[in-house]
Amino acid sequence: MHNILARRASLVKASEIREILKVTENSDIISFAGGLPAPELFPVEEMKTVCQAILAEDGMKALQYSTTEGYKPLREMIAGRMRALSIAAQSEDILITTGSQQGLDLSGKVLLDEGDGVICESPTYLAAINAFKVYSPNFIEIAMDEQGMRMDELETALEHNHRIKCIYTIPDFQNPTGRTMSLERRKKLIELANRFAVMVIEDNPYGELRFSGDRLPPVKSFDTEGRVIYQSTFSKVLTPGIRVGWICAAPEIMQKYVVFKQGTDLHTSTFSQMQVNKFVELFDIEEHVSKIRQVYRRRRDCMLEAIRREFPDYVTYTEPEGGLFLWITLPAVINARDVLLSCLQQKVAFVPGGAFFPNGGHENTLRLNFSNMTEARIVEGIGRMAGILKECKNT
Ligand code: PMP
């Protein structure tokens, strides 16, 4: 079989999260594994109204092919939302993508040749690693602390590696750690990107899900040289099943994204794009997001309280100000994959952290998602995990 496959097919393997998620589809499992939004918050009734209105008013257009760049009123609406974040964007600067995941794949296609350097946070988003890996880059991991990616390490990496093409960062409530990059570091990041003439991919699916602290301007808002390719999505503020995301970038580079997107899917579903736009027209999306924030804040607080109360002292954890995840570090001798096997026997799931490090290692870490389970299940699940962790220490 492997003779007929391209060499790059051997570079990728099924994502560990997807494999674990297969088990967690079983409803009696308490799953902290996926990055799933809370489905009970999806605006199902509102979407019925939205779909009916579109089909009644503009049905033929909704079901027809459309342009690769995307549905113009949606691009205008998104550009307005970008400007509210101090990003100087017009509708022409926006390309609609099929989820922001497509943006990552397109960035790989547009930017990366074999052996090019991609700088990323250590750890970073697993599906970005997998999307980039296909292009055989060299991943350069930069350590993080509570302020996000460390700028001293970033500067050293840029000084010592001469084939770096881009810095991939998730500044807000990072997946998988939940950490947020400080304002000072955002400014330093753009300064370094300009000095070393590298691109920045700013991936921001969670920025609107802040529960505490002050909102920080995106790195893109400090970009004066067209260095930042900003991407975001409606997955976490509306619904992920609709698959509508976007890229905001300088025109010269955007043209390349458009050509590659044509080869991938011609365009993102016309009907989906119109649904997002109509939802924002007919309903108050800010109010909807504020409901999501309230629920997730309670779930985060509940998980943190349970961890503080139940987990052994040797466990350290992040305390995110928003988003969907927190990050656990165990003593170096404990392997999170072994902990997972014991947890699965007690019907609790999470993702071992090793998978989030492109160059391997860090097997004593793990990611917990708090958005998808009720508070009662969070308390129960953390209790079961705590029992297993206490036993690990004794063996
Ligand atoms: N980037 C990050 C950091 C993510 O966590 C996710 C979703 N888990 C995505 C991109 C992709 O999201 P989507 O394709 O649904 O927009």
Image (tube, grey):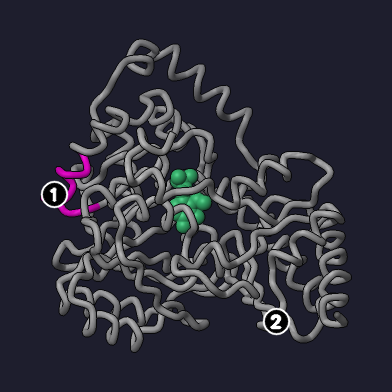
Residue 256 in magenta stretch: yes
The image shows residue 58 at horizontal and vertical percentages of 37, 15
Q: Is residue 235 above or below residue 225?
A: above
Please give left or right for residue 279 compared with residue 339 in the image: left
Residue 391 in magenta stretch: no
Taking the spot 52% from the left edge, 64% from the top edge, the residue there is 356
In the depicted view, which residue is nearer to us: 63 or 295?
A: 63
Taking the spot 66% from the left edge, 73% from the top edge, the residue there is 328
Q: What element carries label 2?
A: loop
Majority secondary structure of magenta residues: helix
Identify the image quadrant of the N terminus: top left
Rendering quarter of residue 387: bottom right
Residues rendered magenta in the picture:
249-258
Taking the spot 34% from the left edge, 57% from the top edge, the residue there is 84
The image shows residue 388 at horizontal and vertical percentages of 85, 69
Three-letter code for the amino acid on which mark 2 is drawn: Val
The image shows residue 111 at horizontal and vertical percentages of 21, 55
Q: Decide if ligand 1 comes within 8 Å of the CB at mark 1.
A: no
Taking the spot 52% from the left edge, 82% from the top edge, the residue there is 146
Q: Residues within 10 Å of mark 1 (few under 14, many from 20)?
A: few
Identify the image quadrant of the C terminus: bottom right
Q: Is residue 374 above or below residue 218?
A: above
The image shows residue 294 at horizontal and vertical percentages of 66, 57
Q: Distance between the residues labelled 2 and 1?
A: 50 Å
Q: What element carries label 1?
A: helix
Please give left or right for residue 215 compared with residue 253 in the image: right
According to the image, label 2 marks what residue? 333
Which of the two labelled residues, at mark 2 and mark 1, occupies the earlier sequence position?
Answer: 1
Three-letter code for the amino acid on which mark 1 is drawn: Pro
Q: Residues within 10 Å of mark 2 (few under 14, many from 20)?
A: few
Identify the disc placed on residue 11. Answer: none
Identify the disc placed on residue 251. Answer: 1
